[in-house]
């Protein structure tokens, strides 16, 4: 069978290529088993996400020979999956709800199809119906959503990184609103950060046309404004602006936002500048206006909101990205980028066993002298420095020949050189670049 993770031939349970172990006994009936071919084109791999209304799979497009993601409509409370993957409802009285949900799911695909030209929005490449369900095919994004990133970095992002999120998603919303669409679910869960530092707006399951007479009630406490709590609430660009401002408030301060319903009773949420010292009073005032409870008092367009943000930030930061340059040895001429806070693992094989567990190397140096996991390099944009840690047998060295102590963190600056084993094996230069 094919490996559900890398899609290479894997006759045994453990893949010799990537180290992934597939155990059919651990999978449940809610998901399609790996290996199934959808739409005579997409080979299903492992499940990478599951919610109340859908399942997301890693897949391989056999026409293009590339990885992709496939989102399946699967309202698990009202359906069962038969052995042939066909979906049936538990009770015929729920069929209308099932079919309406399927139409909304397909509407999500149509919405995203309109936004294919926007690089800040997840790209949908195909959608189709099969097995009495519906499927959306999207580009494969390697990274994590902003909610997971916050957990990884201690619950708060740096001021510069938070501003980058604000700028990028504002520009994404300009494209979305120009297409006549409201996202209606902006939050850290629906903002994706790729490993190369791109910021992408995802999950348009709640999106609706701006001219819809009635909108469904959608409540994500802390991010949904008052108008989303009722069917006749007046929703528009100001609805997404509230959610985006709330997202910025949270990621830059680490403080949970008071839900709109509670704010209507007693609005004692502190100004952003009081809980995030890096935020100026001017920018705090802009965010406060964007989060006004009365939608008429908020910004009415993202253009207007973004303009005031930029006026309040006199020095608009550029996002810095670390660069690892292989300047001599086996990998000479290659390089890898490291976004702020990201760690790159370097070793001899893609997936070594470290302390009895399967690990993963981001950059492979194919030399018998290099350890399975040789060293790690992390970039910190706020201080513009690299953290290097050696885990090898044969050593990681400074340019002057001094060996790094095993397991100890060393701070290094752009322009510094490190050597793996010896100069003939691998020489790495640390560098940075500024990106918009």
Image: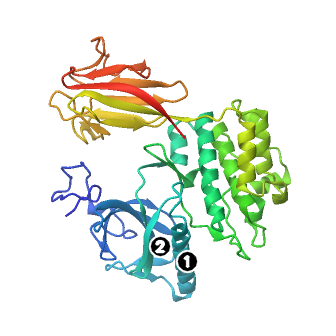
At label 2, counting other C-alpha atoms closer than 10 Å, the crowd grade (few under 14, some 14-19, many 20 or more) is many
* Quadrant containing the N terminus in the rendered view: bottom left
Does residue 175 appear in this view? Answer: yes
At label 1, counting other C-alpha atoms closer than 10 Å, the crowd grade (few under 14, some 14-19, many 20 or more) is some
Q: Earlier in the sequence, mark 2 or mark 1?
A: 2
Residue at point 68%, 62% (across, down): 219
Image position of 256 (left or right of 25): right
Q: Which residue is mark 1?
A: 101
Q: Which residue is mark 2?
A: 73
Residue 107 vertical position relative to residue 344 in the rendered view, above or below: below
- Across and down, in percent, residue 126 comes to 42, 71
Q: Where is residue 398, by image quadrant?
A: top left
Residue 230 vertical position relative to residue 19 in the rendered view, above or below: below
Does residue 270 appear in this view? Answer: no
Mark-to-mark CA distance, 2 and 1: 8 Å
Query: Camera-side residue: 238 or 405?
Result: 238
Residue 192 vertical position relative to residue 114 in the rendered view, above or below: above
- Across and down, in percent, residue 229 comes to 74, 65
* Quadrant containing the C terminus in the rendered view: top right
Image position of 379 (left or right of 352): right
Residue at point 70%, 58% (across, down): 224
Residue at point 25%, 53% (across, down): 21
Q: Check if mark 2's residue and mark 1's residue have beta carbons within 8 Å.
A: yes
- Across and down, in percent, residue 163 comes to 63, 40
Query: Camera-side residue: 403 or 309?
Result: 309
- Across and down, in percent, residue 284 comes to 76, 39
Residue at point 34%, 20% (across, down): 417
Image position of 339 (left or right of 350): right
């Amino acid at each position: 069978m094919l490996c559900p993770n890398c899609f290479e031939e894997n006759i045994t349970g453990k893949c010799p290529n990537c180290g992934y172990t597939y155990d059919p006994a651990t999978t449940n009936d809610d998901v399609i088993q790996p290996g199934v071919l959808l739409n005579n084109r997409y080979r299903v791999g492992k499940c990478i996400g599951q919610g109340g209304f859908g399942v997301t799979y890693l897949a391989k497009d056999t026409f293009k020979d590339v990885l992709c993601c496939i989102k399946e409509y699967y309202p698990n409370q009202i359906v069962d999956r038969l052995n042939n993957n066909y979906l049936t409802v538990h009770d015929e009285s729920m069929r209308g709800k099932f079919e309406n949900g399927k139409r909304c799911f397909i509407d999500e695909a149509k919405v995203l199809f309109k936004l294919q030209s926007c690089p800040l929005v997840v790209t949908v490449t195909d959608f189709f119906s099969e097995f009495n369900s519906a499927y959306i095919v999207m580009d494969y994004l390697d990274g994590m959503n902003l909610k997971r990133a916050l957990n990884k970095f201690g619950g708060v992002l740096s001021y510069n990184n938070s501003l980058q999120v604000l700028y990028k998603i504002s520009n994404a919303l300009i494209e979305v609103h120009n297409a006549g669409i409201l996202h209606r679910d902006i939050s850290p869960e629906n903002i994706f950060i790729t490993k190369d530092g791109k910021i992408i707006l995802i999950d348009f399951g709640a999106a609706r046309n701006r001219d819809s007479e009635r909108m469904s009630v959608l409540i994500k406490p802390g991010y949904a404004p008052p108008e989303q709590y009722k069917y006749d609430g007046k929703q528009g660009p100001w609805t997404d602006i509230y959610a985006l401002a709330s997202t910025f408030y949270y990621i830059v301060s680490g403080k949970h936002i008071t839900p709109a319903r509670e704010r209507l009773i007693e609005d004692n949420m502190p100004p952003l500048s009081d809980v995030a010292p890096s935020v100026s009073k001017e920018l705090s005032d802009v965010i406060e206006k964007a989060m006004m409870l009365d939608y008429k008092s908020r910004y009415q367009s993202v253009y207007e909101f973004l303009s005031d943000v930029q006026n309040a930030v006199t020095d608009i930061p550029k996002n810095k990205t670390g660069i690892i340059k292989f300047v001599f040895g086996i990998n000479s001429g290659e390089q890898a980028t490291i976004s702020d806070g990201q760690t790159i693992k370097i070793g001899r094989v893609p997936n070594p066993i470290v302390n009895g567990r399967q690990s993963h190397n981001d950059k492979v140096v194919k030399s018998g002298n290099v350890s399975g996991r040789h060293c790690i390099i992390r970039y910190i944009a706020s201080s513009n420095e690299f953290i290097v840690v050696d885990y090898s047998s044969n050593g990681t060295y400074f340019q002057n020949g001094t060996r790094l102590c095993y397991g100890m963190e060393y701070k290094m600056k752009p322009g510094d050189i490190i050597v793996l084993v010896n100069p003939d094996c691998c020489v790495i230069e640390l560098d940075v670049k500024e990106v918009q």
